[in-house]
Image (cartoon, helix red, strand yellow):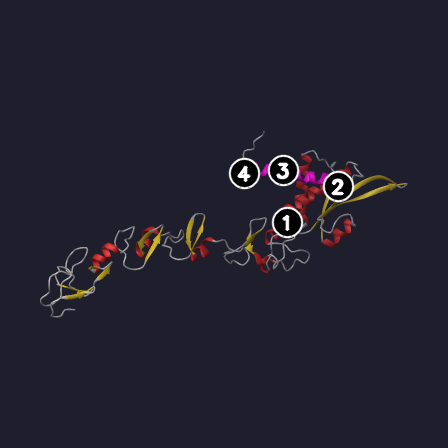
Amino acid sequence: MTRPSQPLCRGCGQSINGYYLSALGAAWHPEHFVCATCHQPINNTQVNVREGKPYHTQCYRDRFDPRCAYCHKPITTQYYTHNGASYHLECYQEHIGPRCQYCHKPILGQYYTHEGAFYHSECYRDHVVPRCAYCGKPLMSEYLVDHWGTKYCKEHQGQYPTCAFCGRLVPPQQQDPQSSEHVRCPICRASAVESLPQARAIFQGLMQQLNAQGLQFNNIPLQIELVDRARLAQLLNGRSGVDALGVTTHSTHMLNGQVVRTEVNGIAVLRGLPSTLFRGVCVHELGHAWLTLQGIRGLPSWAEEGFCESCLSYWKLLRHIAEELADGTTMMQA
């Protein structure tokens, strides 16, 4: 604002004749009201003041506004701070800030880290996080993992029945409506031994393997039978628990109240077992058959069952070695 009077100029201390500027509580010759940085007159109405000193707007920004640690230019709008440094939004996004490992675009706001990499929330949810094996939802919070490595939502644990043989959960869409005896998952159902010709082929192969390892059956033509749960319980006749999967049947010949001989009739196994489990049950029962054929009677239950489990363990070891050799794995001997 200018007006005619004769006040003193703060800049030079002389009286003012004519027009003057009134600013910072004092009068100034127009040529003496200068920027504290460039010392050039401030001729427009925009002025910045700091600690009682006037500045051109641009000079003020150049001197006092924060500078971007990347491009070193003044920052006059919103900015980011990172590790104590300030950045233009654009400089931070394009050159400093984290980028999504999936889409490679800058990350602003909330994000996720996984194995040392950064992800947008949406990219992490849609492309990185594991999904429930049963409902397909992303597992963003706590979840369960079964023995087979299957990941699934916690709420499914009591929601779906488990496979009677492997323990996997079996959702409704995977259940077999034609199976009334037990719940089976698709994996166990796919390898199930359902027919007698299939069972006989597997059984004969197992006998040959055990014969080759010294467990001889005296060329007796042992038979395999597939039975349902009710028939198996009848054959067991209370000799084992309700969870038994097979039984060795035999006939005992008596004379004057004394056992003359015991003949093995065959082996009965629950129908519908997955192939691997079927083989294991057969090997276990063949252990019982071998003891009977050798005339070994009267063993405590724990001893007889322990022998049969040892046969099964040895057979599993042989099978594992055969699989490794087939895969080309080198076996090392200590």
Secondary-structure class at tag 1: loop
Secondary-structure class at tag 3: helix
How far separated are the C-alphas under marks 3 and 4? 15 Å
Q: Which residue is mark 2?
A: 302
Residue drawn at (77%, 52%), measured in percent from left and top? Answer: 234
Identify residue type, mark 2: Trp
Identify residue type, mark 4: Asp
Mark nearer the viewer, 1 or 3:
3
Mark nearer the viewer, 2 or 1:
2
How far separated are the C-alphas under marks 4 and 1? 23 Å
Q: How many marks?
A: 4
Instruction: Decide whether residue 233 is among the magenta residues.
Output: no
Position of 71 compared to 261: left or right?
left
Residue 285 in picture, x, y percent from top left? 72, 43
Q: Nearer the viewer, residue 284 or 333?
A: 333
Q: Which numbered disc, 4 or 1, marks the residue that appears first in the sequence?
A: 1
| Contact flag, marks 3 and 2 (Cβ < 8 Å) | no
In the rendered view, tell whether residue 12 sits above or below residue 256: below
The residue positioned farthest toward the left in the image shown: 17
